[in-house]
Image (spheres, grey):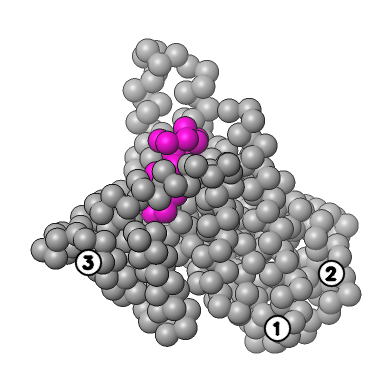
């Protein structure tokens, strides 16, 4: 009976978001409230459970995602993203230009939210395609594959960071493993798949070429741009690697733990970025602060969606149905990594949002970790990979790609949607392979 109630609740959630188009945060809260009552939680405790779920989820994530958004905004507004893209593309000859845009998408995609990176880098892709006379999708899709994978797999992006918290994973190790899994997924979904798309010749709108371009003097140096954009990765992944080679009782370990703490890493990064991409570029503190304030406005709804998912998860925990579901799933002769990926894939197909798919799945499969001994870091990556599966007409990213490239729905399904399927499946295979060695 409990399983039927939970499945009915998830179905209602899907209908509210995908069919009724109700605000996602409100949908999560309504479903959490209804499930709490239906699962037998005393009425006066349902509200408390929802508030606790929101508080537990946002307590850690507000800092990480807030600073992550600020960093992405500073990278964009300073011209650092353009510097990285322009330099890489100028270094690579035409026959290797795909790899230039892949590297650009990967480097810029780590600190920057997907939609922001998409809008900033796509005009550059259009210009490169026109200059090199290469097919537009042959150039553009590899960059978008890199952006998509960083969005789905790697902290400090919202869904992976929230999954780290939900699964009790280590953000540094998750990032390190994620980098290993991401590279083959990007190569398969990007440059290799794009070679089959030369027959497509979309005509993007000319207005898309009129985005702001920075002059040489306005942009920071390449070294400054890359080091600032990747500083969180350097600190978090570097700390994870150091822990492998340095003894736990070493005098260096407190310092390594300090800089490897995600909150500390993001604070250090933002302070550095304020100087390297702001004050040292001639901007006033007022201008820098305005950019960071605008960044927070952009992620307000994302934070609320994550909070709503936290409320739903807490209802499942308080009602103890979460443990019951975990015991049932444990009896299936299927790897918990595959289950996490499959459940996230199914919800992604129904709802469209990768963030919603990943976070909803976490509330269902999190109990499998202590029951099966699954590596929580790999569970984050498996869920993240599943959350990218088969983007179609209910996903805003699908329409963003379709409209910018001026493709038909049919051709968007054959290009964008297939690319998302490839990076999702490659991510699962990469996680399963990595699971054999750790």
For image coordinates 44% across by 78% down, the residue present is: 15
Q: Is residue 169 above or below residue 28?
A: above
Q: Are marks 2 and 3 in contact (CB under 8 Å)?
A: no
Mark 3 Cα within 10 Å, few/some/many (few <14, many 20+)? Answer: some
Q: Is residue 307 visible?
A: no
Residue denoted by label 1: 409
Distance between mark 2 and mark 3 Cα atoms: 51 Å
- Which residue occupies the foreground of this view, 80 or 186? 186
**For the residue labelled by badge 1, is the local secondary structure a helix, a strand or a loop?**
helix
Mark 1 Cα within 10 Å, few/some/many (few <14, many 20+)? Answer: some
Using the rendered view, name the quadrant where residue 268 is placed: top left
Residue 116 is marked as none
**For the residue labelled by badge 2, is the local secondary structure a helix, a strand or a loop?**
helix
For image coordinates 63% across by 28% down, the residue present is: 437
Does the stretch in magenta take in 157?
A: no
Spot occupied by residue 45 in the image (x, y as percentages of width and height):
14, 59
Residue denoted by label 2: 197
Distance between mark 2 and mark 1 Cα atoms: 16 Å
- Which residue occupies the foreground of this view, 236 or 285? 236
């Amino acid at each position: 009976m409990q399983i039927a109630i939970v499945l009915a609740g998830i179905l209602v959630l899907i209908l509210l978001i995908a069919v009724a188009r109700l605000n996602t945060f409100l949908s999560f809260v309504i479903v959490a409230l209804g499930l709490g009552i239906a699962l037998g939680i005393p009425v006066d405790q349902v509200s408390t459970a929802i508030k606790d779920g929101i508080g537990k989820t946002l307590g850690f994530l507000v800092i990480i995602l807030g600073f992550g958004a600020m960093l992405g905004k500073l990278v964009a507004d300073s011209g650092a993203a353009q510097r990285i893209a322009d330099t890489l593309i100028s270094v690579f000859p035409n026959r290797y230009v795909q790899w230039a845009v892949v590297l650009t998408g990967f480097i810029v995609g780590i600190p920057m939210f997907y939609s922001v990176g998409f809008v900033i880098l796509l005009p550059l892709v259009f210009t490169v395609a026109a200059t090199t006379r290469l097919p537009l999708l042959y150039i553009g899709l590899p960059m978008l594959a890199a952006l998509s994978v960083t969005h789905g797999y790697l902290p400090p992006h919202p869904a992976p960071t929230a999954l780290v918290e939900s699964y009790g994973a280590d953000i540094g190790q998750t990032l390190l493993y994620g980098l290993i899994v991401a590279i083959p997924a990007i190569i398969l979904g990007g440059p290799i798949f794009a070679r089959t798309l030369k027959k497509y010749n979309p005509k993007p709108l000319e207005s898309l070429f009129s985005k702001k371009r920075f002059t040489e003097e306005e942009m920071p140096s390449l070294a400054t741009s890359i080091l600032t954009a990747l500083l969180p990765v350097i600190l978090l992944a570097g700390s994870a690697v150091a822990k492998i080679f340095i003894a736990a009782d070493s005098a260096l370990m407190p310092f390594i733990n300090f800089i490897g703490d995600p909150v500390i890493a993001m604070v250090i990064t933002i302070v550095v970025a304020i100087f390297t991409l702001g004050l040292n570029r001639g901007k006033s503190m007022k201008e820098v602060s305005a950019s960071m304030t605008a960044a927070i406005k952009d992620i307000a709804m994302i934070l609320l969606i994550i909070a709503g998912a936290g409320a739903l998860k807490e209802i499942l925990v308080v009602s103890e149905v979460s443990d019951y579901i975990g015991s049932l799933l444990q009896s299936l002769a299927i790897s918990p990594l595959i289950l996490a990926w499959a459940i996230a894939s199914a919800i992604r197909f129904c709802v469209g949002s990768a963030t919603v798919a990943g976070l909803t799945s976490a509330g269902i499969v999190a109990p499998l970790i202590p029951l099966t001994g699954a590596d929580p870091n790999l569970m984050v990556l498996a869920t993240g990979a599943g959350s990218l599966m088969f983007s179609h007409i209910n996903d805003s990213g699908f329409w963003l790609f379709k409209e910018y490239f001026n493709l038909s729905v049919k051709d968007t399904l054959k290009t964008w949607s297939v690319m998302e399927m490839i990076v999702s499946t490659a991510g699962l295979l990469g996680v399963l392979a990595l699971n054999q060695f750790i």
